[in-house]
Amino acid sequence: MLEIRDLSKRFGQTRALDGVSLQVEAGQMVGIVGRSGAGKSTLLRGINGLTTPSGGCVRYAGVDVSALRGRHRRDWRRRCAMIFQQFNLVHRLDVLTNVLAGRVAHRSTPRTLCKLFSRRERALAALTLERVGMAEQILQRADTLSGGQQQRVAIARALIQEPEVILADEPIASLDPHNASLVLETLREINRHEGISVLLNVHTVEMARAHCDRILGMRDGRVVFDGTPDELDERSLAAIYDMPRAAESAPEASTPAAAGADAGGLAAVN
């Protein structure tokens, strides 16, 4: 189980996280929604150790992973894989090599840089690419792929780490609706079949509702909603996006669209 206890993060006078506490059971798919600047990305980076908390801690399986350093932190980042909005692929390298880079936590960095991968690792990469529907592009350069294809390669790179938790930070923000759905369906399938916990930052409320078991709503560095997609109602959206007038006047059926209009297009993929 992943447990976050009173997690806080300050950047100067700005409080990006303000005492966040929650638990994520193994195998859950959790969507995190909220305005830009609500603390969604800072929360994921705090879990993974890419940013050091100002207070509180992150525990996994009873271990305070936010206090880990050196090799132990590196091992935690292998077990807690990150997927980013900008894909972070090496464009001049082929798909296979980009995916194999995910094995760096299992081996020495010099061997990875020299592309000294075993037959087992290459076979594992090929199988992983087949799982995300990218087997036919295995030798294609990354910069020749569409945005949706690049994100699926990034998912394969995360999977080959053999993680127990996947953190996806706005993975569909730069994708069209079709590719956004494919990427979220891929993450959902991995979640269901592998039992890997997935925490997903997403601007699109309807995407979170369609693909996640649980939704967290963040505002001003705090969690102001924690419930199922069915519980994310008009009142909850008003609390997350600070829209009391929209919540009072808009009929329930139009709530997602109203939220999108106020929060920069939440009902449509960015």
Image (tube, rainbow, N blue to C red):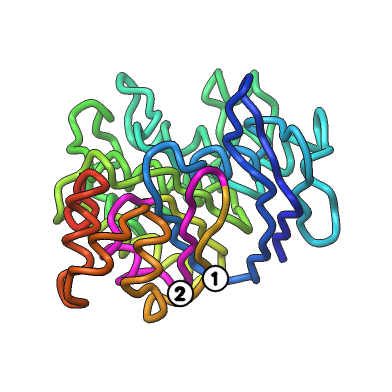
Answer with left or right where residue 222 lies relative to residue 235: right
Above-or-below relation of 38 to 205 = above
Which residue occupies 62% across, 48% down? 80
Position of the N terminus, as image quadrant, is bottom right
Residue 214 within the segment the image draws in magenta: yes
Image quadrant where residue 73 sits: top right
Residue for badge 1: 28
Which residue occupies 72% across, 35% down? 53
Position of the C terminus, as image quadrant, is top left
- Say what secondary structure mark 2 lies in: loop
Answer with left or right where residue 108 lies relative to residue 61: left
Above-or-below relation of 33 to 110 = below
> Is disc 1 in contact with disc 2, using a CB cutoff of under 8 Å?
yes
Residue 146 within the segment the image draws in magenta: no
Which residue occupies 32% across, 50% down? 203
Amino acid marked by disc 2: Asp
Residue for badge 2: 213
Which residue occupies 42% across, 48% down? 156
Earlier-in-chain disc, 1 versus 2: 1
Q: CA distance from mark 1 to mark 2?
A: 7 Å
Q: Which region shows up in magenta?
A: 202-221
**Disc 1 packing (10 Å; few <14; some 14–19; many ≥20):** many
Residue 262 rendering spot, x and y as whole percentages: 23, 49
Residue 186 rendering spot, x and y as whole percentages: 34, 61
Image quadrant where residue 140 sits: top left
**Disc 2 packing (10 Å; few <14; some 14–19; many ≥20):** some
Q: Nearer the viewer, residue 110 or 258?
A: 258
Q: Nearer the viewer, residue 78 or 176?
A: 176
Residue 243 rendering spot, x and y as whole percentages: 31, 56
Residue 142 rendering spot, x and y as whole percentages: 28, 30
Q: Nearer the viewer, residue 108 or 68?
A: 68
